[in-house]
Amino acid sequence: MEEKTFERGRDETYYFDDGDCMFLVDGVLFKLHKAFLNRDPESMFFGMLNIPQPKILDAEPVKLTDDSAEEFRALCWVLYALPDAIHIQATANAEIPKLLKIAKICHKYTLAKIETWALDMLKIQCKPAEGSPGCLAACSEDLLVEIMTRAFDANHIPLRHIIEETWLSRLDAGEISYRTTLTAGEMQGWIKFSTRVYTRLNKKLSGTRLPTANPFSHLDLTDGQLLRLLSGSMLLSNFWSHFRRNLPREDECTDHPWNCLAPWNRLAWSDSSDIWAGLHAAYKAIGTEHRDRCTGLYINQTLRTFSVTLVESFFGPQS
């Protein structure tokens, strides 16, 4: 059988003459060693390379689609890297773009252990430390979204937490747009994060004198985001209004008008832009003598459930 030829180049680094498996990625040929790809029995490569098949020739390599040569090269790097190169990724000289490529391609091919390692290294770079605010403090919006995506792919909770707090801090400082932030949250279905953003926007609206012409243009939201914000704001305002007017009476309460309603009506209520703060202020203001009466019990019960109310105001009931 006549061997086919390719008008494609061999990778300069990861084409080993003694390799025993061949891949064609984005027009580039990689010739690797099965032993390096077979170390994780749960990976897709393990199954791919252990299916009985004819000898792989240069003319007929395994074709990997939807991967870039740079991403596959990053995978090869981590498979063949020596300890000193691996160690550098935990230092200030880490290669963040390479770590992101590794995390992305390892997620696709279920190389979970390497994916977790790459994200652990990213966490080191992202986490604020003494003398360093972390790489997220001044990175571009695109890089922030990319790191967020990789953290969500693997459900890397520690990295997600760092991303959330740093992102919101930069949002408050006006360094990142609300549109980008909410779009990223929507793409990942990150409702808790998005709720915190909408809560900030609701407070921003409350403290801003809006013009009658194009009153919300300064927010630069999509139509869907603006609708969610305004409907959520209305629902929270409605909730707060009814909460303040309706103090339920506990069954065992015998002097409700004097010892419950009277101190309740004397409370100085805040507006609905920060209900959390309003609830805590009211609970503090009633004093210890009313904590076990209708007033304290009602506020305390509302505090316990308000996180659900807040989410449902912007996103509806959650299953």
Image (cartoon, helix red, strand yellow):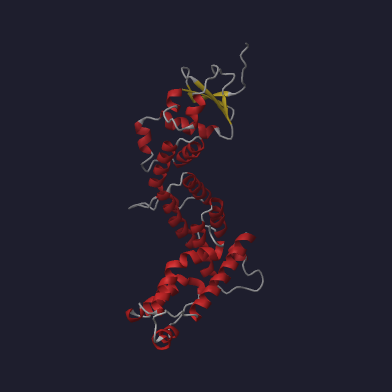
- What is the x, y in percent for residue 154? 46, 44
* Residue 118, image x, y percentages: 42, 40
Query: What x and y, as percent, mark residue 53?
Result: 54, 19
Q: Residue 30 placed where, x, y %?
A: 52, 25
Task: Identify which residue is drawn at 51% across, 57% down.
Answer: 191
Q: Is residue 103 left or right of residue 230?
A: left
- Farthest residue toward the right? 213
> Which residue is rendered at x = 45% and y = 35% of the image?
111
Task: State whether residue 207 appears in this view.
Answer: no
User: Is residue 295 in view?
Assistant: yes
Residue at 60% of width from left, 23% of height from top?
8
> Could you tell me how many numbered marks the image carries?
0
- Residue 124 relative to residue 207: left or right: left
What is the quadrant of residue 206 in the picture?
bottom right
Task: Kindly give the residue lying farthest to the top in the view shown.
Answer: 1
Residue extending farthest front: 251
Tell me what residue is drawn at x 45 percent, y 55 percent.
Answer: 164
- Front-lying residue, 296 or 221: 296
> Residue 78 is drawn in which quadrant?
top left
Relative horizontal placement of residue 74, taking residue 223 as reference (left or right): left
